[in-house]
Structures are given as structure tokens and as C-alpha cells.
Image: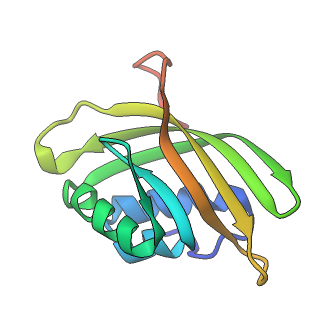
Amino acid sequence: MPTTRAEKPQDLLPIIEDAINRADLDAFLAAHDGAATVVVPPGGRPAHGHDEIRAAMAPVLAMRPRLETAVVRTLLADGFALSHSRWRLTLTGTGSRSPLRGLGTMVARRTEAGSWLILLDNPLTAADREDPGTEVA
């Protein structure tokens, strides 16, 4: 299991991937700033703050998703990080094995303690046009 503290922005995706794969809502929330906004799949409704994010993500995690992610690029400036990622998600609790794919955008900020927390997360930035047979690394 990855650490629960992100020492650099690129640590956030493995933390989120692990939390979602274990359906651990508390670990998912712990990676987010208290004022975070998350675009919640599948409908793309934004959820603001831990209470709304918890309510919106609980049904998603109940579907027992299996998530794979890869950071595509991260830009850093003045305590903020903009990351683009590629992801693949299989919803195992629905009986469906067809993976969903996409490209996500995440903004994180460095805390006073030096760790990183997610401030904005939009996993639905764009559909992934990658060859369906290509694996997420």
C-alpha cells in the first residue's frame, strides 16, 4: 500500500488509486484539501468539500471499481501542481468488465507541513483516444 502522505504531487495518484481499489473513502478524502472540488463520475457532477465528496463518492466505491492510473505530465509553480493523467476503470460490482478510459486533470497544493493535497480533480477531462488494447503503465 502506498504512503498516505504525498511528499510530491506525483504521489497523489498512487494514493488515490489505492484508496479507490480498496473502496477506502477515508483514505480518498485524506488526499484532498478540505476545500477541494472533485468532478464525480460517471455523471460529472462537481462535489465541494469533504462532506459532499463523501456523499458523491460512496455510491461509486460501492460498485467496487478497479482503477489504474498513470501520470502523463506535472507542472509546478509556487506551491501548486497541475497534473494530467491517463486512467482506466473497471466497475466490478456491476458485473461489467468493460473498462472505462479517460484523461484527468488535477490541481494540488503544497501544505504548510510540506505534503501535497488535491484541490481540484476532474477525472473526466476527456475521453482517452488511446488504442483500446494499450495498457496503462
Residue at screen point 60% across, 63% down: 118
Q: Position of residue 99 (x, y in %)?
A: 31, 33
* Location of residue 43 (image quadrant): top left
Residue 27 lies left or right of residue 114; in this view the side is left
Q: Position of residue 130 (x, y in %)?
A: 50, 19
Residue 100 lies left or right of residue 78; in this view the side is left
Residue at screen point 37% across, 43% down: 44
Q: Position of residue 63 (x, y in %)?
A: 20, 54
* Location of residue 90 (image quadrant): top left
Q: Could you tell me which quadrant the C terminus lies in? A: top right
Say how many tags the image has. Answer: 0
* Camera-nearest residue between 116 and 72: 116
* Location of residue 108 (image quadrant): bottom right
* Camera-nearest residue between 67 and 37: 37
Residue at screen point 72% across, 75% down: 115
Q: Is residue 57 above or below residue 49?
A: above
Q: Position of residue 128 (x, y in %)?
A: 48, 24
Residue at screen point 87% across, 54% down: 77
Residue 44 lies left or right of residue 137; in this view the side is left
Instruction: Point out the residue furthest to the right here.
Output: 78
* Camera-nearest residue between 113 and 135: 113
Q: Is residue 17 above or below residue 53?
A: above
Q: Is residue 111 above or below residue 20?
A: below
Q: Is residue 57 above or below residue 97?
A: below
Instruction: Point out the residue furthest to the left here.
Output: 95
Q: Indicate the colouring scheme.
A: rainbow
* Camera-nearest residue between 90 and 32: 32
